[in-house]
Amino acid sequence: MTLQLEQKEASILDKMVDPSLNLDLEEMKRRCNSCRVSNPLVCRETCEVWRLKSIQNSLRKEIPDRPDRLTITSATRNPESLKFLQGLSQGRTNVRVRSEEPKDYVGELLQAGLIFVDKNTYRLTSAGEKILETLLMYPLELSEKTEALDEKVLTLLLGGTSTFESLSQTVPRVELTTALRRLNASGLLNRTSSQGDVLYFTTKRRPTRHLLPSELKVFKGIPKTGITARELSKKLDLTKPATYRYLRRLRYRRHVVRRTQELAFGLTPKGRQIAQFLTAISKTVGNLAASDFA
């Protein structure tokens, strides 16, 4: 009797399933509600509509109204994701939802609100179209995944060279040290100065007191950006003791000052490109409305 009942229910399910399975979520729910089976396991084991509805429901769980930038960049920063988005934007909308679990990058794109499911087919949201437009403005290698903290440091350095102390006001020192080490190893930043270096600067454009020829030579050899005594001795072909002696005289006459340099960092050309890419993505995300993710 039980076997006959299950066979009868299976035949009912066969009639309920459309061969093309071109159904949206509401239609699937309607069909499930109108279907009468005594054992839900029959649906789980034999009904294609139930499986598709279950997958779509799982994909729609916990999708925020407006995902943040980190969620979006994490979902788009791999070649497969970009290729998938490009395929949808170029009219290849026949990418259908399958009855098995979606690939990881598809799930991430759904979670980020860049694609959605319409009648069992993946389609781009308005947010997905705008994000894709920004992504295509930059080389693919710039979208390689990096740590969130590294991205924050890159963005901070986009405004110019910054010292370790200045960066540590925004990023905790321990995490900052780790991030700087990773970025330096990746060739995205370099040190513009070493901690403890003493630089000499001129205080006036031209001497206001009479200087000896050798003192005037040292005075004119100091650039606006400052210079160490070692570099100055090499530049002027002087011995270090002589260079220090002339610098002391110039400091006494208030023509030169010295400052202890802090450890400072700047971006390499590649690092600057990635920082600009992150800034552009952030700006695009910031201009999106909740309706763009619908």
Image (tube, rainbow, N blue to C red):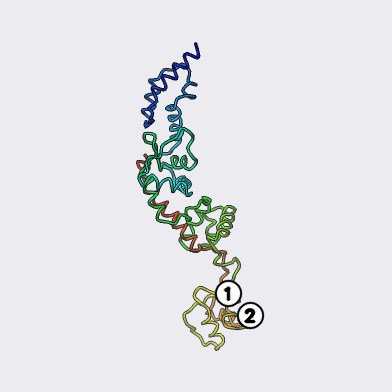
Q: Position of residue 267 (x, y in %)?
A: 50, 62
In-image side of 33 versus 171 (left or right): left
Residue at 49%, 35% in the rendered image: 101
Residue 159 against residue 143 in the figure, above or below? below
- Work out whether residue 197 or residue 98 is closer to the camera in this orientation and state it: 98
Q: CA distance from mark 1 to mark 2?
A: 11 Å
Q: Position of residue 131 (x, y in %)?
A: 39, 49
How many neighbours does mark 2 have within 10 angstroms: few (below 14), some (14-19), or many (20 or more)? Answer: some
Amino acid bearing label 1: Thr
The residue singled out by tag 1 in the image is: 228
Q: Which mark is residue 125?
A: none
The quarter holding residue 249 reads bottom right
Q: Are marks 1 and 2 in contact (CB under 8 Å)?
A: no
Residue 168 against residue 30 in the figure, above or below? below
Q: Secondary structure at mark 1?
A: loop
- Work out whether residue 116 or residue 98 is closer to the camera in this orientation and state it: 98
Q: Secondary structure at mark 2?
A: helix
The residue singled out by tag 2 in the image is: 240
Residue at 59%, 80% in the rendered image: 234
Amino acid bearing label 2: Lys
Give the position of the C terminus as an image quadrant. Answer: top left
- Work out whether residue 149 or residue 24 is closer to the camera in this orientation and state it: 24
How many neighbours does mark 1 have within 10 angstroms: few (below 14), some (14-19), or many (20 or more)? Answer: some
The quarter holding residue 22 reads top left
Residue at 46%, 23% in the rendered image: 43
Q: Earlier in the sequence, mark 1 or mark 2?
A: 1
Q: Position of residue 283 (x, y in %)?
A: 40, 52
